[in-house]
Image (cartoon, rainbow, N blue to C red):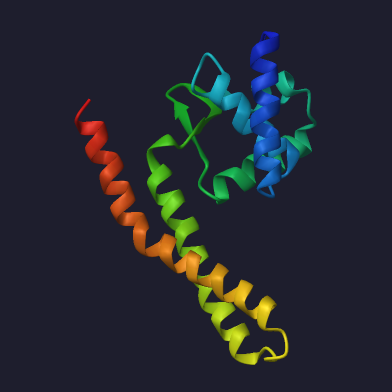
Amino acid sequence: MELNDKKRALIEKIGIAHEEKGFQPVAGRILGLLYVSPRPELTFDEIRETLNISKSATSTALNLLMHIGHIDYITFSGDRKRYFKLKMSNWRELIQNEIERVIKMSHVLHEVLEERTKDTPEFNCSIEEFASFMQFIHKEFPGLLQRWEQTREQK
């Protein structure tokens, strides 16, 4: 598959953004490719050849992306190949899962505060502020999503 320079640059930007979130570089670039590809589904070989990556790296990244729910695959009757695609319909679930991880961390930080020395009040205050903000985000998220959906309905 031929990609122009603009699409290659976008793949790189998306890849770097995902790397900053802790993804493997190849996984981020596969997501980037699936976003900019003219077709929404690509085969293993199309992904591997377009990004010029090894079979092993491609397989590892695709398995990771499927495991964490970012991509899925489909098959077509009479064709033995798997076609990989972004799971765009579950973005709300992915964000909700992130919010749930945030609230778990907030609870852990409150436990940390119970065990910390009182001799570091500034640092302890910073931890408490962070934990409190995470609880705030968790509490406000449903309303935020609802307000966003209302603005979408008005269009």
Q: Can residue 24 be seen in this view?
A: yes
Q: Tell me the residue at 55%/45% (across/down).
A: 66
> Is 94 placed left or right of 64 in the picture?
left
Q: How many marks?
A: 0
Image quarter of the N terminus:
top right
Q: Where is residue 105 in the image (x, y as percent from the top left)?
A: 55, 71
Q: In this view, does 87 lie to the left or right of 55?
A: left
Residue found 49% across the figure and 22% down from its top: 40
| Front in this rendered view, residue 2 or 60 | 2
Residue found farthest to the front: 122
Residue 32: image quadrant is top right
At x 46%, y 50%, the residue is 94
Q: Is residue 105 visible?
A: no
In the image, taking residue 123 as reference, residue 87 lies left or right, namely: left
Q: Identify whether 145 is placed above or below 153.
A: below
Q: Quadrant of the C terminus?
A: top left
Towards the viewer: 142 or 18: 142
Question: Which residue lies most toward the left here?
Answer: 154
Q: Nearer the viewer, residue 63 or 2?
A: 2
Q: Which residue is drawn at 45% across and 64% down?
A: 100
Q: Is residue 145 left or right of residue 154?
A: right
- Indicate the position of residue 144 as horizontal and vertical percent values: 33, 50
